[in-house]
Amino acid sequence: MRHGLSSFNVEHRIQGRDDLSSLTDTGQSQARATGAALRDLTFTAAYTSPLRRAADTTRLLLAEQGQGLVATADDLLLEIDLAPWSGLLRQELRERHPDQERQWRQAPEDLELQRADGHTYQPLQELMAQAQQFRRQLLERHGAAIADDQAPPQTVLVVAHNAILRCLLLALLDLPLTGFRRLRVDNCSLSVLNLSSGGVQVESLNGLAHLGDPLPSKGPGPRMLLVRHGETDWNREGRFQGQIDIPLNATGRSQAEAAGRFLAPVTIHRAYTSCMARPRQTAEAILASHPGVPLTSSTGLVEIGHGLWEGRLEQEIAEGWPQLLADWKRAPQTVQMPEGETLQEVWDRSLATWARIAASLGNDETALVVAHDAVNKTILCGLLGLQPADIWAIKQGNGGVTVIDYPEGAGGRPVVAAMNLTQHLGGVLDRTAAGAL
């Protein structure tokens, strides 16, 4: 999580690595609210940046959380070093260093600054190396639990800053620094990543519901809300449903209604859904709070076609196609479903549909898109710069809400403002069904 609102955040000043700002009263309240939201969790360890705004956030959070844990301060969680800019108002930065400020916004990985001794350095490149070092240290300290899927699970809290957390997310996902601007990390937001012997899975990003705000604030440009349909009986059973038109069950209807209440305060201008029953029913439940919003069905958003696997439990598939199922779990991009689709085919049609919807939106419009697990995962992989091979790195819970912004317009760089928000379904962690697609 990121620290609470600081004095420099309020003043729109560059804070970077200097320890000149402190938590505001709002920031302190945010830290306590986050601690309350985390009371159900037991932490193995906690790590914090030593800078005051992060260390104070961690102290207040852990006191409210009630476990009695003391965090370890770690210099590898220090914020980006922007010493030549430190303390400047953002407007002053634009006026004094317009070329550097533009570089920071457009391609921050190439930004060069000059230290007091005259030497130039690349602050984001240095920060990425720092994030990778913290990643290695984290894996060394907790690697035994990660390597052994049968070992008791460990939960680790990391409290730091905007830029270092974005770099840490990129490092965990093995993504390049060009993805830095594709992520958003708000004050006291919660992100959950699951590390196992199989790799890293992003469960959620930038959740703010514990602070009373359903979604991150919207700036200029179109916004798209990507939702996975509610639960079906086949999700609960772990049965592969694919393009068989299974409706929502009672839990799924409750999840759809909860998503509707969660998104009720949000202005929605248009809505799109897969033409199948389970996403359409989910979309209709959400739109009950948005009368008059048109709902358009699209075949480009239908779930992956599992072919002969559809309607079968995993055990049945293991008996008939053991190697193909193993490949699906290990290297899903290599699998041609028997009489079904490949991930690349789903990737092509889902991302093309998404791009068409985005291109149709005005700068102030928000669109709702309700689809399926594999469809949503391919869309998010594409937006984050991942590949079809990486779909297991993305989690999509039934009724989970994802927020994608286009601050530069629909043709510009997308920003994953939040991903797989499920707090409206109960608790910080995603506890929805982990059944088959």
Image: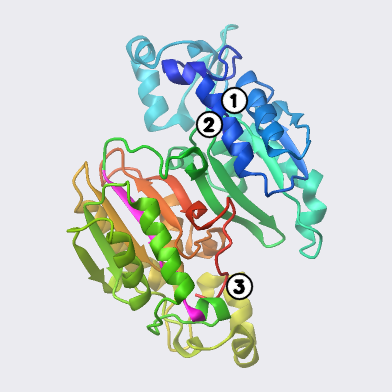
Q: Secondary structure at mark 3?
A: helix
Front-lying residue, 132 or 212: 212
Q: Which residues are magenta?
A: 222-233
Q: Residues within 10 Å of mark 3 (few under 14, many from 20)?
A: few
Give the CA distance from mark 2 to mark 3: 33 Å
Tell which circle, 3 or 1, labels the residue nearer the N-terminal end.
1
Q: Residues within 10 Å of mark 2 (few under 14, many from 20)?
A: some
> What residue do we see at 78% from left, 58% from top?
147
Instruction: Give the total number of marks visible in the rendering.
Output: 3
* Residue 211 appears in view: yes
Left or right, 291 with reference to 335: left
Tell which circle, 2 or 3, labels the residue nearer the N-terminal end.
2
Give the CA distance from mark 2 to mark 1: 8 Å
> What residue do we see at 57% from left, 6% from top?
116
Which quarter of the image is occupied by the N terminus?
Answer: top right
Which residue does the numbered mark 1 point to in the structure image? 79
Q: Position of residue 332 (x, y in %)?
A: 54, 71
State the image quarter where residue 22 is shown: top right
Q: Position of residue 79 (x, y in %)?
A: 59, 25
**Disc 2 residue type?**
Asn
Left or right, 363 with reference to 349: left
Q: Position of residue 27 (x, y in %)?
A: 54, 25
Q: Secondary structure at mark 1?
A: loop
Which residue does the numbered mark 2 point to in the structure image? 162
Front-lying residue, 179 or 225: 225
Which residue does the numbered mark 3 point to in the structure image? 329
Give the CA distance from mark 3 to mark 1: 37 Å
As for residue 232 lying within the magenta part, the answer is yes
**Disc 3 residue type?**
Lys
* Residue 1 appears in view: no
> What residue do we see at 60% from left, 40% from top?
168
Q: Are marks 2 and 1 in contact (CB under 8 Å)?
A: yes
